[in-house]
């Protein structure tokens, strides 16, 4: 399956910046000359909209089509249904149809590995694949974790956002033990950070002293920015919308951090302590 690296961007809590992280990292890696595929696995189609598709529900071919095909023992030809963004990212779109398809997975044999079958097929054509997960720990998120090499966990520096991380880590640990033994945690990423507030600094410090003793907490933090929030409306990345801004610079630094983790994650047998 080549040297393709697959990242699931995951958190069961909504509004923590999963889509922004997925789109920004995918674009950053593409701009470095890599072949990159972004899979939108959220029925809300946030990543699809962020990449310029104004009405995902009008699309004939989406991730729901892929999952349905594999459920029925079919195959999807390479590049079918994949769209191209002007900034160099290929993406498989998603829409509300995935909600119905997810429900039908409950009665399918090896239901946790349907998405993995498709991802494994695409690995040979890409250097990096990013999966933008829905805000839940449902069957499609389990599928994403089953298909991934590593998971990136975005979270806001707020009490409620950080409180749910342990639950997610326990779920990741279960997937690693029972479904995908090669799954690693790339790290927890603080997003929409306003470093001027005492609360944000306290949450950051608590995460680094607590969770940071067991898993990686990225040094890079993504700052809050109104300019970044405008990107989905424009259908472009932060690198196009505000290339010289603080968020674009943060994502460039994050890209370097993710790259520095490299292939070492595949060889780690680290016990994360969430058994």
Image (cartoon, rainbow, N blue to C red):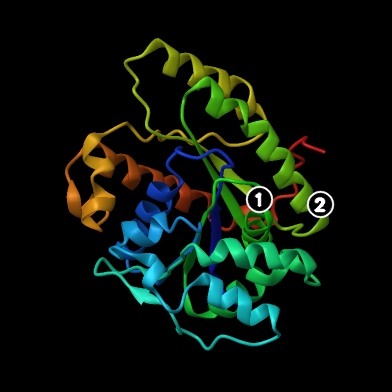
Q: Which quarter of the rendering shows the N terminus?
A: bottom right
When the figure is inspected, residue 275 is found, relative to residue 64, above or below; the finding is above
When the figure is inspected, residue 187 is found, relative to residue 255, above or below; the finding is above
Q: Indicate the position of residue 226 as horizontal and vertical percent values.
A: 23, 35
Would residue 26 be found to the left or right of residue 218 on screen?
left
- Nearest the viewer among 6 and 98 is 98
Would residue 83 be found to the left or right of residue 68 on screen?
left
- Total marks drawn? 2
Tag shown at residue 57 = none
Q: Indicate the position of residue 165 as horizontal and vertical percent values.
A: 62, 33
When the figure is inspected, residue 78 is found, relative to residue 158, above or below; the finding is below
Residue wearing tag 2: 177
Query: Mark 1: few, some, or many residues within 10 Å (few <14, many ≥20)?
Result: many
Q: Which quarter of the rendering shows the C terminus?
A: top right
Residue at the (56%, 47%) spot, across then down: 10
Residue at the (26%, 44%) spot, across then down: 248
- Nearest the viewer among 189 and 14 is 14
Residue at the (77%, 41%) spot, across then down: 271
Q: Indicate the position of residue 150 as horizontal and vertical percent values.
A: 60, 53
Q: CA distance from mark 2 to mark 1?
A: 11 Å
Q: Residue furthest top?
A: 198
Query: Mark 2: few, some, or many residues within 10 Å (few <14, many ≥20)?
Result: few
Q: Secondary structure at mark 2?
A: helix
Residue wearing tag 1: 184
Q: Which image quadrant for residue 37?
A: bottom left
Note whether residue 47 is visible: yes
Q: Secondary structure at mark 1?
A: strand
Q: Which image quadrant for residue 196?
A: top left
- Nearest the viewer among 113 and 190 is 113
């Amino acid at each position: 399956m080549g040297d393709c690296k697959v990242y699931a961007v995951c958190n069961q809590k909504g509004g923590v910046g999963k889509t922004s992280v997925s789109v920004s990292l995918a674009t950053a890696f593409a701009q470095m000359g890599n072949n990159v595929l972004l899979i939108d696995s959220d029925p809300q189609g946030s990543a699809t909209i962020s990449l310029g598709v104004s009405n995902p529900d009008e699309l004939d071919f989406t991730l729901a089509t892929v999952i349905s095909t594999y459920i029925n023992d079919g195959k999807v030809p390479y590049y079918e249904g994949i769209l191209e963004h002007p900034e160099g990212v290929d993406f498989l779109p998603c829409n509300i149809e995935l909600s119905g398809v997810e429900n039908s997975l409950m009665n399918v044999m090896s239901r946790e590995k349907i998405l993995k079958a498709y991802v494994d097929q695409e690995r040979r054509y890409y250097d990096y694949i990013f999966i933008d997960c829905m805000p839940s720990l449902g069957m499609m998120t389990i599928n994403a974790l089953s298909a991934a090499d590593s998971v990136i966990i975005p979270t806001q520096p707020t009490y409620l956002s950080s409180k749910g991380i342990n639950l997610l880590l326990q779920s990741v640990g279960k997937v690693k033990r029972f479904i995908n033994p090669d799954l690693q945690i790339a790290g927890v990423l603080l997003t929409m950070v306003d470093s001027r507030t005492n609360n944000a600094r306290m949450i950051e410090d608590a995460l680094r002293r607590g969770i940071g003793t067991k898993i990686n907490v990225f040094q890079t933090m993504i700052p809050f920015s109104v300019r970044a929030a405008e990107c989905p409306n424009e259908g472009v990345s932060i690198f196009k919308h505000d290339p010289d801004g603080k968020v674009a610079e943060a994502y460039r630094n994050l890209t370097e951090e993710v790259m520095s983790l490299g292939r070492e994650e595949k060889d780690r047998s680290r016990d994360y302590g969430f058994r």
